[in-house]
Image (spheres, rainbow, N blue to C red):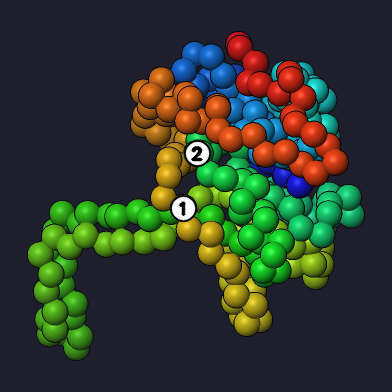
Amino acid sequence: MHAVILAGGKGVRLRPYTTTLPKPLVPIGDEYAILEILLHQLSRQGFRTVTLAIGYLGHLIRSYIGNGSRWGLRIDYASEEAPLGTIGPLLTMRDRLPDDFLVMNGDVLTDLDFAGLLDEHDATKPPLTVATYARQVDIDFGVLTTKNGQVTEFTEKPTLYYQVSMGVYGVAKEALAKYEPGLALGFDELVLDLLAEGRHPREYRFDGYWLDIGRPDDYDRANADFPHLRTQLLEGPIRVVPGRGEPAPQASASRR
């Protein structure tokens, strides 16, 4: 029950909010940082150890989060001197990771059952399990299919449906074995390599609340949604870990 939170990006799309704060520390609902909500959820779901992969303004994250005792967690840190992509930071800490673990972006707001995803990943043993979410894209134009200068199909303002990655994964350490630490590696590269090898990642489909806080519009929506979702996000079911009892009493999102 170990989680790695990717918290090293510069958050360029979220500027000016991220000019002086790393994206995982921007406040939600004027009370909590995004990262606090994630740590609170992980603690309630039975996770006890977390690695924060930090980079841009990482010293602020270290200072604010500390050792994780506020949430009943043991937190350590992995620093990247240069951007390493989504998967690259995992290679630098590979030797101290368990065989299977959770990886998540530090800017997601969701009520996903993280422990449930990792349980299914552990039970089915794929190299990678990807949490997915249904998205639809409305096209405001008539769409033509053409071939050899002729129109072969026409659809007026279609709606396209996709299953998109939520930025939350179950990862088998062995899936990372062939890559060299210190080099950049993206999630896209890992998935394409696995597909080329015939080792298909597993899907963990989710239809609850999910928001990737990547742009100012997303951030505004998160703050508008939070008052209505506060209980749903912060007071989900507590998972008792065998032999460890319930999460520590202080394992709550601390008020800013």
Judging depth in this view, the residue of 193 and 104 nearest the camera is 104
- Please tell me the numbered disc located at residue 247: none
Which residue ends up furthest to the right in the rendered image?
Answer: 95
Q: Is residue 95 left or right of residue 158?
A: right
Where is residue 248 shown, x and y percent of the image?
77, 24
Which residue ends up furthest to the top in the rendered image?
Answer: 256
Distance between the Cα atoms at labels 2 and 1? 10 Å
Judging depth in this view, the residue of 17 and 125 nearest the camera is 125
Q: For the point 50% across and 38% down, which residue is it?
A: 110
Q: For the point 20% across and 85% down, which residue is it?
A: 147
- Tag 2 residue: 110
Res. 14 in view: no
Q: Is residue 54 left or right of residue 157?
A: right
Q: For the point 60% across and 75% down, which residue is it?
A: 200
Q: For the point 21% across and 60% down, which residue is it?
A: 159
State which tag comes first along the sequence, 2 or 1: 2
Q: Say what secondary structure mark 1 lies in.
A: strand
Where is residue 54 shown, x and y percent of the image?
73, 36
Q: Is label 2 in contact with label 1 (beta carbons under 8 Å)?
A: yes
- Tag 1 residue: 206
Q: Residues within 10 Å of mark 2 (few under 14, many from 20)?
A: some
Judging depth in this view, the residue of 240 and 72 nearest the camera is 240
Where is residue 79 shown, x and y percent of the image?
79, 38
Q: Say what secondary structure mark 2 lies in.
A: strand
